[in-house]
Amino acid sequence: MNSFSRSVDMLHRALDVNSLRYQVSANNLANSEVPNFKRTSVNFESQLKQALESEKNEGESFKMIATDSRHLTSSNPIDYRTVEPRRVLDYTTTSKANGNNVDAEEEAMLVLKTQLQYQLLTQMENFQFSQMKIILK
């Protein structure tokens, strides 16, 4: 896969994750006063980083050959395209007397941050395509 298509694919995935984050934060905000509601967050970047590092370290790692199903196998690199965003429910904290753990101000800031990230990602994608347009001329 060439660098252009990989970059565009990763930007596309980041835009999808930001869209999901926006939906999750909006749901958290909408339920900020519901008793015993627990906030949800989206986990993606750490898994993506792990996949990219496993691809980078593929050539440097020691490979074991398994000739039997009972043998230990070496870890195969994780393809970044298989990484999916995960919704994570926060059961560990309670910030209100009614059992709810959603801080409306924090969620509003996360919504704003997500919107700004989305705008930045669309600008980056536009830049990638403008570079390709220049090359094709």
Image (cartoon, grey):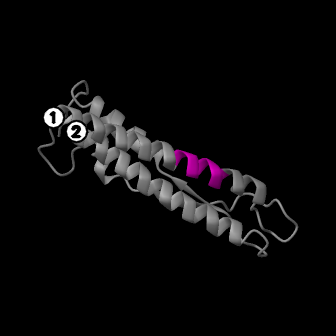
- SS assignment at label 2: helix
- 21 relative to 51 in the view: left or right: right
Q: Compared with residue 98, is residue 111 higher up or lower down, i.e. above or below? A: above
Read off the residue under disc 2.
Answer: 133
Label 2 crowd bin: few (<14), some (14–19), many (20+), radius 10 Å: few
Label 1 crowd bin: few (<14), some (14–19), many (20+), radius 10 Å: few
Which quadrant, please, contains the N terminus?
top left
Pick the front one: 96 or 114: 114
- SS assignment at label 1: loop
Looking at the image, the residue that sits furthest to the front is 137
Instruction: Give the CA separation, mark 2 to mark 1.
Output: 6 Å
Q: What type is the residue that disc 2 sits on?
A: Lys
Q: Compared with residue 59, is residue 95 higher up or lower down, i.e. above or below? A: below
Magenta span dominant secondary structure: helix
- Which residue occupies 85% across, 64% down? 96
Pick the front one: 74 or 5: 5
Q: Position of residue 81 (x, y in %)?
A: 29, 50
Which quadrant, please, contains the C terminus?
top left
Q: What type is the residue that disc 1 sits on?
A: Lys
**What is the quadrant of residue 93 in the picture?**
bottom right
Residue 127, magenta (yes or no) = no
Read off the residue under disc 1.
Answer: 137
- 85 relative to 5 in the view: left or right: right
Please give the range of residues in magenta. Answer: 110-117
Cβ–Cβ below 8 Å for labels 2 and 1? yes
- 26 relative to 2 in the view: left or right: right
**What is the quadrant of residue 62 in the picture?**
top left
